[in-house]
Image (tube, rainbow, N blue to C red):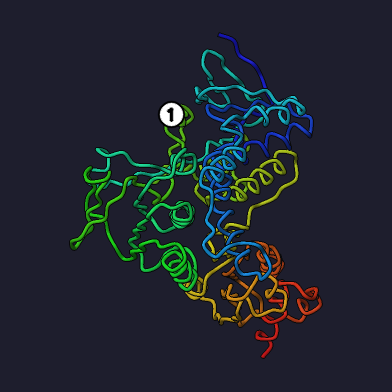
Amino acid sequence: MTDTIYDAIVLGAGPAGEVVAGRLADAGWKVAIVEQDLVGGECSYYACMPSKALLRPADVLAEARRIPGVPVEEDSGLDPAAVLARRDVVIHDEDDSGQLPWLEERKIDLFRGAGRFVGEGRIMVGNEELVAARAVIVATGSGAKMPPIDGLDSVRAWNNRDATTAKAVPASMVVLGGGPVGAELAQAWASLGTMVTLVDAGDHLLGRDEPFAGEEVAAALRGRFGVDVRVGSEVDSVRAGGAGVIVELEGGGAVEGEELLVAVGRKPHTDGIGLEAIGVEPDERGFVEVDDRMRVGGSDRLFAIGDVNGRALFTHVGKYQAWIVAENLLGREVEAVAEAIGSPRVTFTDPQVAAVGKTLAEAEAAGIDARVVEVPTDGSPGASFQGKGTGGRSRLVVDRARDTIVGATFTGFETADFLQAATIAIVAEVPPARLRHAIAPYPTRSEVWLKLLEQWES
């Protein structure tokens, strides 16, 4: 056994781990990164990237059909084999060799294997012990959570990895969970010809977002994609049978599919990394608690970033937290505020749902005297270029007392790029009189901001 001393050791080579490792290495630190799976992490191979690759073809086809003069027949469909092949290109056939030069250029040492703490600042990988002289950053991410449903462990069930990398289109599928993962993958597979049933226990899909957003997505899934959407439906049990899997619902009734996709949440990868060796106990959900500098237990030598700390399970938040840690380790004190404000988030269904900050209900629950400013998303001249009937709503949640935005939600065709302006307005607490000077160019869809400001001032 050998031991090697580094300034910093990063557990996990997903986006969060890569960012903090890169920033420290660029500052001259000697850095090691430990990864037992693929460099690039869950998002690159099994989540964000492949799911968007599966969703995009149907969006393009729908837009082409709306625009007169584009040579697309009304009954034209997608080529599932080509879509899956393109998905494989996007995820590099689950090969991370293309990620390695970035690490090599920064002289970051990559250790492939399961890293675990064996003492403070000491990480064992296989037979090699690594020593961190200055910091260890835990960035081990999360995996799909399997709920305690009777019979679930006795049937074949897909998680997000199975659903985003499947090599063939199933004839039918039941999706459990109507959050972003369930809604996106229900649409993706339905667009390729799968008969999908989506079951969610909540009152509406996308329970984290404004109710109208989930209702619009449900309507599109039913109307455009033929998905059988069942909200307010609790699952009683699961069993094998028929075409594949039968899901029994509480109160009677059942749904059936060749495949069963479970998309009900995430669990952090904290088991097996030796936290007990350093006296760290995860919370009741398994997450590692941190302060606003991402420090574990207030230590300036131990940090946890990304999904593993449970503050906001988004790739972009993990990268933000990586910047927070690097800044603090390099002597520039910074505290995270984005998660408390409300991190930006996008569900890439059609309609897309792009949101940041608080919903109206969250604002009211926080004691804010809030009001809503709302206009149609497709009400600007620029929206006409995407074709008629794209629909959607654009909503701002305004704090009456401070006259600033505390939340924003945009639904409709490709609304994700509306979000950064709203995020800046919320973070900077920009009043409407100042926002009026941020002119939206004509004719673009960003003129929705002009319409919102006019409503705000009325």
What is the x, y in percent for residue 4?
64, 16
Task: Name which residue lies at 68% across and 30% down.
Answer: 98
> In the picture, which quadrant includes the C terminus?
bottom right
Task: Name which residue lies at 63% across and 63% down.
Answer: 64
434 horizontally vs 245: left or right: right
Residue ID for mark 1: 272
- Could one spot residue 395 in this view of the protein? no
What is the x, y in percent for residue 355?
58, 65
Q: Say which of 156 and 425 sits in front.
A: 156
Question: How dense is the environment of label 1, judged by Cα within 10 Å: few (below 14), some, or many (20 and up)?
Answer: few
Q: Say which of 245 and 106 sits in front.
A: 245
Q: Residue furthest bottom?
A: 458
Task: Name which residue lies at 27% across and 45% down.
Answer: 243
Q: Residue furthest top?
A: 1
Q: Say which of 86 and 8 sits in front.
A: 86
292 horizontally vs 244: left or right: right
Task: Name which residue lies at 53% across and 20% down.
Answer: 124
Identity of the amino acid at label 1?
Gly
345 horizontally vs 328: left or right: left
Quadrant in the rendering for residue 100: top right
